[in-house]
Image (cartoon, coloured by chain):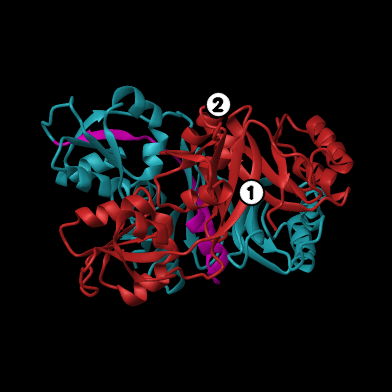
Chain colours: A cyan, B red
Amino acid sequence: MTPKVAYLGPAGTFTEEAARQHNSKAILQPLPSISGVAQAVSSRIATEGIVPIENSIEGSVNDTLDVLIRQEGLFIRRELVMPIEHYLLILPNAPAGNIHVIYSHPQALAQCRGFLESSFPEASLVASLSTSAAVDDMKKSQVAAAAIAPRRAAELHNVQILSESIQDNSSNVTRFVVLANSDHPPTGSDKTSLCFSFAADEPGLLHTTIGEFAHRGLNLAKVESRPSKQSLGDYIFLIDIHGHRDDPPVKEALDAVRLQSSSLRIFGSYPRWA
Amino acid sequence: MTPKVAYLGPAGTFTEEAARQHNSKAILQPLPSISGVAQAVSSRIATEGIVPIENSIEGSVNDTLDVLIRQEGLFIRRELVMPIEHYLLILPNAPAGNIHVIYSHPQALAQCRGFLESSFPEASLVASLSTSAAVDDMKKSQVAAAAIAPRRAAELHNVQILSESIQDNSSNVTRFVVLANSDHPPTGSDKTSLCFSFAADEPGLLHTTIGEFAHRGLNLAKVESRPSKQSLGDYIFLIDIHGHRDDPPVKEALDAVRLQSSSLRIFGSYPRWA
């Protein structure tokens, strides 16, 4: 049976590119939200789901972190890291000058701020729901407009590329995760992602918990906090460590953290991208 | 001379409410971006600036963290915590039923998701640049529309309140900070905010650094990471601790952290809100 891979759509976004790279033979199913992709995986409508989790400039994708924290039975099976290249698109045969409005997702507008300020200081920047929706918004615009989107959006929407690679920072990459109903067996070069929280607001609890990894020489690849959504100042900590949850030092550390925290959820172990 | 307080505008947003609460006699100056507010303070165009830094549901406001990390000579002088209440607004005398489009800032749409799904399952949700811009978008709409915005937007724009307090989570509060050219003298109940980073990706560095606070019984009110923007996996850590930077244990811990980290920036000490 052909596997079905859900992804944060629409088609023509960077997430679709990641999905195509992950499995070019799968049936790709765009869904309108990150929680929708997670639900498609949990309910077995899709075999796997692909969502962005972190960008090297903008930081974490909070919706993805919140879905991992809250949705039981959801695991990370793989990570993919992809360069983010933005293109300035206009209607076929439109004049390049005199652009009044530039549409894109707010993150893409932010990532091209330097280019926009120097090349189009007079244009109004307008938020669209996705880079692909920006192309639709440009098509419907009643004044001369452009859109910032990935190269693939130009092909899909049959529009013209005015400028290539307009992002300010050339080290702009996004990390995507493949969500599934189980994680990945050990490969020898793995990463484990988890979250935990504490019942009491005692000084030193986080220090002791992080120590369980540090004392075993396990590198923390990432530390992040998200609000518990119960009250301000009450957090859930998310960490990535090097190693697989079946490796003895990782297993020992996780057992110790389970005793110290009020909740521990392991999102899974999976091969490290680089 | 009447002090001038810049804030993340436009008027009719929660940040304006925070600015009015901070100093009701100041000249309030709305600016279109968080970095604009920070620059107005650094360049002494404004005495102080007010921006949101954290919401109890959505988490940190990344633009504010990035401005604090990067802009020299900018300090936090005060924090304010305010409840966030969303209102559903329509044009005066518009019929309440049959709403086709609902405009708001994406965070406000997200915070009212439950209400929108149960009361307006058929309506299209459209992103606006601010809750105040959402009211303008509603006014210009060619189909029956509503906007989600604070109560004050209804007064300023002279529109009608259809539903009150439509946010899903009743513990929805936002923390704002007052930016200035200096921080606050000790009051006995203070908080200190800082950021640091490491040159090497050595296991245990973060653990050792957090230990400087834990060993001195200094509570970590918050731990957060932001991308360094140099390369994926390279982070700047931001923490809030209880205490003033002039208190001896805090001073000692900060001196130790300065030696361990490759960069340390103290955003300031200021009175704790609660």
Q: Which residue, as the protein is rendered here, is positioned at the far bottom?
A: B118
At which x and y percent is residue B240? Answer: 71, 47
Q: Residues within 10 Å of mark 1 (few under 14, many from 20)?
A: many
Say which residue appears at 55% left-offset and 33% top-offset.
B231
Disc 2 residue type (three-letter): Arg
**Residue carrying label 2:** B44
At which x and y percent is residue B67? Answer: 55, 35
- Please name whichever residue, B189 or B27, is drawn nearer the observer in this view of the structure: B27
Q: Is residue B155 left or right of residue A54?
A: left
**Residue carrying label 1:** B79
Q: Where does the magenta region start and end?
A: A62-91
Q: Is residue B232 visible?
A: no
C-alpha separation, residue under disc 1 versus residue under disc 2: 20 Å
Q: Is residue B55 left or right of residue B86?
A: right
Say which residue appears at 70% left-offset and 45% top-offset.
B239
Q: Is residue B165 left or right of residue A252?
A: left
Residue A23 to residue B251: above or below: below
Provide the chain ID for the residue under circle 1.
B
